[in-house]
Amino acid sequence: MLNVLIVDDEPLALDVLETYIGQMQELHLVKRCSNALEANEALKSNDIDLMFLDIQMPQLTGIDFVKTLSKPPMIVFTTAYPNYAIQGFDLNALDYLLKPISLERFVKSVNKAVEHAGLAQRDGSPHPSNETQEFFFVKADKKLVKVNFDDIIYIEGLKDYVIIRLMHGRVITLQTMKSLEDRLPNGRFKRIHRSYIVAMDKITAIEGNMVEVQEKDKPKLLPIGKNYRDDLLEMIEKNRL
């Protein structure tokens, strides 16, 4: 059974979700909250598996609230505004429900949550994570572009944008290096510089303060920042013969 938190500033919307949750044997409603600050306190004092979260709320929006959480539960965004969908999925939301929410669509979200929770338990982690996921989506060229982890050679930061260099091309997206670093699987990717993250399996050599990768049939040298060098060499040493 999944412990559920519902967050919405509209009492009627909370009533609808509570009614739906009461019809699902897989769900246990822990608390209903009218704003993000109440939800934050509920997350601190309860073990929450799944949160149905409204986006448009006073003081702090649902999207901004999720950004403050270091270890969020599974998130299903609820909103009357479809234009927030891309932002929701950029935050690894499990689903996105458009109001008024039908029971059929609600059940579909719950089934997805139950499936993800089952996969996470078999992997030994409490919630689904990017450790078992092999891709993510980023917004680029006014659409959501799927990026497979295996295709990434390195990521380069340019002010508010990042360039994801792939085996066959590149993707430019409005992101921060920190947000991408947090979404990449530990061990497979390494931050080597303020402006560079590299796929460990794409490194062909290390010489001095440079990492060599293969890009478009020719070597590419990436700098190693002094603040990242020790962590990188420690990881390399574990795989050294």
Image (cartoon, grey):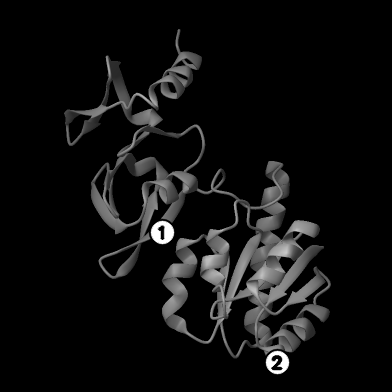
Helix, strand or loop status at disc 2: helix
Q: How many marks?
A: 2
Which residue is painted at 32% across and 26% down in the image?
A: 203
Task: Specify the quadrant that holds the C terminus.
Answer: top left
The amino acid marked with disc number 1 is Phe
The amino acid marked with disc number 2 is Leu
The quarter holding residue 151 reads top left
Residue where numbered disc 2 is placed: 12
The quarter holding residue 69 reads bottom right
- Of the image marks 2 and 1, the number of the one nearer the N terminus: 2
* Vertical relation: 104 (above or below) 27: below
The quarter holding residue 34 reads bottom right
Q: Measured from the top left, where is residue 168 in percent x and y? A: 24, 46
Which residue is painted at 46% across and 23% down in the image?
A: 231
* Vertical relation: 142 (above or below) 79: above
Q: Can residue 47 be seen at all in this image of the molecule?
A: no
User: Toward the viewer: 98 or 42?
Assistant: 42
Helix, strand or loop status at disc 1: strand
Front of the two marks 2 and 1: 2
Residue where numbered disc 1 is placed: 137
- Residue furthest to the front in view is 59
* Vertical relation: 82 (above or below) 206: below
Which residue is painted at 46% across and 74% down in the image?
A: 85
Which residue is painted at 27% across and 53% down in the image?
A: 171
